[in-house]
């Protein structure tokens, strides 16, 4: 192909028509309370690992809802369970992460 | 002879006020422009938060005011101030003199065609919240597909929108969108439902429970971001663009139907009457109460009272409570003369 000296960057648009929500749906079977997240961010704000590893429960749930992979993010969790204590919706966030790991392990 | 009180508007505010005024020994006279009582509520299907059939409320109020004088398909042609009251002239030639006047003219639904970018009246599959309620009530609507796979709701249409001339929040449409999302999901269990919101304002009793239900039991997707534009695909489906402001990314989705949550604006009838008897208008386009804390039902003119959405966006229970308060306010006012 001819080199014009520039390239096109990939669109960052989230396309819900093509988004693959199978991972999210699998997670909701094991952790149905994942659906009730209201993206308040308490979990991420309280997370000790997050500022260093990039882990954020809020982002994990949102990314799954938009059909994105979260494997790398989840690996930044140390399963301390601090985030469970602050979630106003009472989501068992630690269990949610464990369930995600189980799904990835399958 | 019982004393005449003219009530302009036969929606739930006017009906409830008439009922209370009858109990207090007055002769309420309702002037309603439509051919039926109940206003917007009479066209609604079910009311949040208990899913009460709207018709039940209207029917019940109707039975309770059978003694009142009711003029249907009638409008006020002129109101003028007399020395100690008002002379109300109706378009059917009737003239009523009263010492107290209640304005209960309610709201008008924001005209969604004004938000051209959403395509109401342009694309075939775009409807409003009120169109959807009419369909729930059994009215045929060719715009609603038989088996929609994806349905979207746009919050704040014509509300919180200075460009549309309305800075105010319409209060009821967040919970209405969630209620309707649940009802659509019940009718079409396989459909994916998306609510596009800027904030979710679920302030009332049990509203938050509605939200949690919609998420947990009905899997409604909530996307924080205002729809920026809607386009029509060749097959009639709708291409919707927004920013997912939580993800910080542009988002697009193809929908089979889009429901616009049209907000409330003041009924032009109220504006007209305000002009005739010099009632203050507020900068939100609604009638201005004497104050917004303690005297919502009072106007700046003696003997003129307000109830319901003529002074701002209101829920059904707020409207009913104000109608009761206005009836008591009128009674106290007349006794003080
Ligand atoms: S369990 Fe994981 S996500 Fe939650 S606070 Fe601990 S490290 Fe952070
Ligand atoms: S604290 Fe709970 S509700 Fe808030 S973002 Fe985290 S998981 Fe969601
Ligand atoms: S109630 Fe919700 S949808 Fe309606 S105007 Fe207010 S924020 Fe917007």
Image (cartoon, helix red, strand yellow):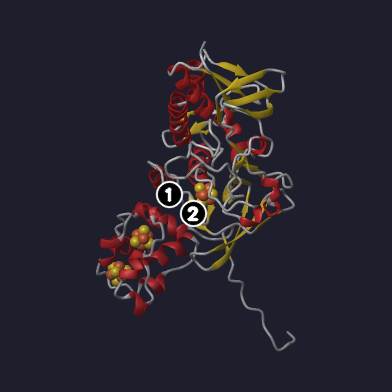
Of residue B34 and residue B218, the one placed in the foreground of this image is B34
Label 2 Cα crowd, 10 Å radius (few <14 / some 14-19 / many 20+): many
Q: Can you identify the residue that label 1 sits on?
A: B215
Residue A21 at what x, y percent from top left? 49, 58
Of residue B179 and residue B18, the one placed in the foreground of this image is B18
Left-right relation of B205 to B290: left
Q: Residue at x 44, y 46 (%)?
A: B214
**Which badge, 2 or 1, is on the more N-terminal residue?**
1
Of residue B143 and residue A19, the one placed in the foreground of this image is B143
Can residue B193 be spotted in the picture? no
Residue B190 at what x, y percent from top left? 52, 43
Relative vertical location of residue B306 with respect to residue A81 in this rendering, above or below = above
* Disc 2 element: strand
Q: Chain of mark 2?
A: B
* Disc 1 element: helix
Q: Are marks 2 and 1 in contact (CB under 8 Å)?
A: yes
Q: Can you identify the residue that label 2 sits on?
A: B222
Outermost top residue: B1
């Amino acid at each position: 192909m001819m080199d014009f000296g520039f390239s096109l960057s990939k669109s960052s648009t989230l396309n819900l028509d093509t988004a693959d929500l199978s991972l999210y749906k699998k997670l909701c079977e094991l952790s149905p309370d994942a659906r009730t997240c209201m993206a308040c961010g308490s979990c991420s704000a309280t997370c000790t690992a997050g500022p260093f590893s990039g882990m954020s429960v809020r982002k994990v749930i949102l990314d799954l809802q938009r059909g994105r992979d979260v494997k790398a993010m989840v690996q930044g969790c140390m399963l301390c369970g601090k985030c469970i204590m602050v979630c106003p919706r009472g989501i068992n966030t630690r269990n949610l992460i464990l369930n995600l790991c189980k799904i990835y392990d399958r | 002879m019982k004393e005449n009180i003219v009530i302009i508007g036969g929606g739930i505010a006017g009906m409830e006020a008439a009922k209370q005024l009858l109990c207090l020994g007055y002769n309420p006279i309702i002037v309603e422009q439509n051919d039926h009582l109940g206003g917007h509520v009479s066209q609604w299907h079910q009311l949040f938060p208990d899913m009460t059939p709207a018709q039940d409320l209207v029917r019940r109020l109707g039975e309770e005011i059978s003694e009142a004088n009711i003029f249907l398909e009638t409008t006020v042609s002129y109101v003028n101030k007399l020395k100690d009251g008002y002379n109300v002239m109706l378009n059917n030639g009737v003239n009523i003199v009263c010492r107290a006047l209640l304005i209960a003219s309610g709201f008008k639904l924001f005209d969604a065609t004004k938000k051209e970018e959403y395509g109401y009246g342009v694309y075939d599959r775009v409807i409003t919240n009120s169109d959807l309620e009419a369909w729930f009530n059994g009215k045929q609507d060719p715009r609603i597909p038989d088996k929609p796979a994806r349905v979207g709701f746009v919050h704040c249409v014509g509300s919180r929108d200075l460009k549309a001339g309305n800075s105010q929040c319409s209060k009821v449409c967040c919970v209405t969108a969630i209620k309707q999302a649940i009802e659509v999901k019940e009718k079409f269990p396989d459909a994916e439902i998306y609510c596009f919101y800027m904030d979710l304002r679920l302030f009332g009793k049990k509203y938050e429970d509605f939200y949690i239900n919609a998420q947990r039991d009905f899997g409604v997707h909530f996307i924080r971001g205002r729809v920026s534009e809607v386009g029509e695909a060749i097959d009639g489906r709708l291409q919707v663009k927004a920013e997912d402001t939580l993800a910080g990314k542009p988002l697009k989705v193809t929908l089979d139907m889009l429901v616009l949550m049209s907000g409330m604006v003041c009924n032009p009838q109220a504006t007209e009457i305000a002009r005739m008897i010099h009632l203050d208008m507020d900068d939100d386009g609604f009638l201005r109460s004497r104050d917004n804390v303690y005297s919502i039902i009072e106007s700046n003119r003696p003997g003129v009272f307000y109830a319901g959405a003529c002074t701002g966006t209101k829920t059904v229970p707020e409207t009913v409570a104000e109608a009761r308060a206005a009836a008591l306010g009128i009674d106290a006012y007349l006794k003080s003369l």
